Image (tube, rainbow, N blue to C red):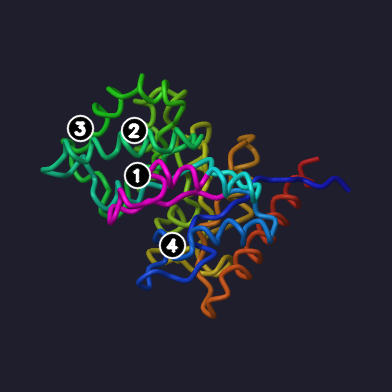
Amino acid sequence: MKKYNYPIGFMQGRLSNKIDNLIQAFPWDDWENEFLLAHENSIQIMEWTLDAKRLYENPIMKKEGRKKIKHLCNKFNLSIPSLTGDCFMQKPFWKSTNSEKLQKDFIEVCKSASSLGIKDIVIPLVDNGRLENSYQYKFLIDFLLSQNDFFIDQQIRILFESEFDPSKLKTFISKFPKDTFGINYDIGNSASLDYNSDEEFLNYGDRILNIHVKDRLKGGNTIALGHGNVDFKKVFKNILNTFYKGNFILQTARAEDNNHVRVILKYKKHIESLLEELSLSKK
């Protein structure tokens, strides 16, 4: 039987204990150890996470820190192809009265990521980052389009994670060039909003460049895979039917017993088995 290999990685911090009881935050005390843990458990992809708090203290934003990150990537055979900018959600420049400074922060994040070979920068247009009026909508579009040449020069792509319904997200992403902009599809968020994955992939499946894997209750929080509102077989059939070539990043529920490595490996095996089953059924 042919073995199908899919690029499944983890959201930084998911192998460490929670910070301030948050489901996701940069693991200040354990970030270096996560490289070792990933290597020991045959995980080769990490998505970096960046918070607004202590932004410029984050190792990715410092020359010596990036040198350390490169060393750890080489030592433990781990790649960091993407970065989730929770900092942009926490302090969205498209909403702020201090927009100029936050725009400069955004540019510095892009430069720092690019210098490490990180290709995809995720902008979460959810929660505090959601677009709430036409001014914010136009402001964000105009600013990002004005930086398109910069993104090309830095060899990065901007990916939007959004709560827009499928039709509205199709309209939104159509305003951006395909070479430098795309969609980060969050399986759990879509399930929480009760969106139909058939409709989603019909509208913008060809623009999806990165996928966050989690399960959520309808209108509720992240929960263990298989216990929420996600129809995993339906979603993954749609993913495979679009000939998706990107990564699957486990942004899953945390372990109740703090054995976070064990639960990530459980979820990884579950997704691998599902993808392999669906791939074989297409033959």
Q: Name the secondary structure under disc 4.
A: loop
10 Å crowding of disc 4: few (<14), some (14-19), many (20+): many
Residue identified by numbered label 4: 27
Q: Is residue 1 left or right of residue 232?
A: right
Residue identified by numbered label 2: 172
10 Å crowding of disc 1: few (<14), some (14-19), many (20+): some
Residue 47: give x, y in percent of width and height. 50, 49
Q: Is residue 214 left or right of residue 160?
A: right
Task: Work out how far the residue at label 2 is from the one at label 3, CA to CA, in angstroms.
Answer: 13 Å
Task: Work out how far the residue at label 1 is from the one at label 3, CA to CA, in angstroms.
Answer: 17 Å
Q: Residue at x 18, y 39 (%)?
A: 101
Residue 1: give x, y in percent of width and height. 89, 48
Q: Nearer the viewer, mark 2 or mark 3?
A: 3
Q: Label 4 is placed on what type of residue?
A: Pro
Work out whether mark 2 precedes mark 3 in sequence or the reverse, and give the earlier one.
3
Task: Work out how far the residue at label 2 is from the one at label 1, CA to CA, in angstroms.
Answer: 9 Å
Work out whether mark 2 precedes mark 1 in sequence or the reverse, and give the earlier one.
1
Work out whether mark 4 precedes mark 3 in sequence or the reverse, and give the earlier one.
4
Residue 225: give x, y in percent of width and height. 57, 65
Q: Is residue 46 left or right of residue 269?
A: left
Residue 46: give x, y in percent of width and height. 55, 50
Residue identified by numbered label 1: 164
Q: Nearer the viewer, mark 1 or mark 3?
A: 3
Residue identified by numbered label 3: 139
Q: Name the secondary structure under disc 2.
A: helix
